[in-house]
Image (spheres, rainbow, N blue to C red):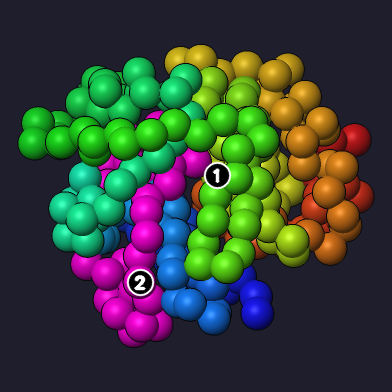
Amino acid sequence: MALKWKMITVGPFAMNAYLLWCDETNAALVIDPGDEIERIAQEIEREGLQPDRIILTHGHLDHVMFASAMQEKFQLELYMHREDVFLVENMNRQAARLGLMMPGLVAPRIDGYLAEDDTVTCGKQTLKILHGPGHSPGSIMLIGEDAAVVGDVLFQGSIGRTDLPGGSYEVLLDSIRTKLLPLQDDVLVLPGHGETTTIGAERRNNPFLR
């Protein structure tokens, strides 16, 4: 029995949405369904999954833009950290700041909140929630036995940007050093953009962490 995952890179921001599922029950979590909802739905159907809920790693536009459509399609509840609600509630303002005219954006319904040391079940699997502010105030990471979904906190050879509302370079580095670097070297890092990496590789090679 193991937790399986699939990365689906979507939208003009090349954002990585994820499906996480228990291979014994096929219960699945949908992580950051920000765009191309039909593609994500096709993967759900191809794998024979039973989506259980949506989890947002944070509230930036590319991660939440069409999450409401995923909610409606599969009748799913959605969970995120309370401190990023202001971002989700101001999706149109985020779009305008990026020069995008998207007046029809609909903010998803938030059904509950996740915070440090909460746990999320996925079939017979359990993931731990870590709060990792710095890229956004309410960024969260989902930590399994051998993989971590980290949103835009950490990337292969880089870190999340900190020049958006609520961002802080110092806070982000502290989040990475105190929450992620204590994990085992072989833990797979599943980031919000770009390729996967490992904790060990970033500890050794990431120029921001030296």
Q: Secondary structure at mark 2?
A: strand
Q: Residue furthest front?
A: 124
Task: State yes or no: residue 135 in magenta.
Answer: no
**Which kind of residue does numbered mark 1 sit on?**
Gly
- Which residue is disc 1 drawn over? 151
> Please, is residue 194 above or below residue 62 in the view?
below
Image quadrant occupied by the N terminus: bottom right
Query: Residue sitting at 24 percent across and 36 percent down?
Result: 109
Q: Is residue 175 left or right of residue 113?
A: right
| One can see residue 91 in this view | yes
Image quadrant occupied by the C terminus: top right
Q: Is residue 204 left or right of residue 124?
A: right
**Which kind of residue does numbered mark 2 sit on?**
Gln
User: Who is closer to the viewer here, 119 or 65?
Assistant: 119
Foreground: disc 1 or disc 2:
2
Q: Is residue 118 left or right of residue 138?
A: right
Q: Secondary structure at mark 1?
A: strand
Q: Is residue 56 left or right of residue 38?
A: right
> Please, is residue 206 above or below residue 131 in the view?
below
Task: State yes or no: residue 49 in magenta.
Answer: yes
Q: Residue furthest left?
A: 104
> Please, is residue 202 above or below residue 28 in the view?
above
The residues colored magenta run 38-67
- Which residue is disc 2 drawn over? 50
Q: Residues within 10 Å of mark 1 (few under 14, many from 20)?
A: many
Among the 4 quarters of the image, the one containing residue 45 = bottom left
Q: How many marks?
A: 2
Among the 4 quarters of the image, the one containing residue 27 = bottom left
Picture coordinates of residue 193, whole percent (x, y): 53, 51
Marks 1 and 2 sit apart, C-alpha to C-alpha, by 23 Å
Mark number, residue 17: none
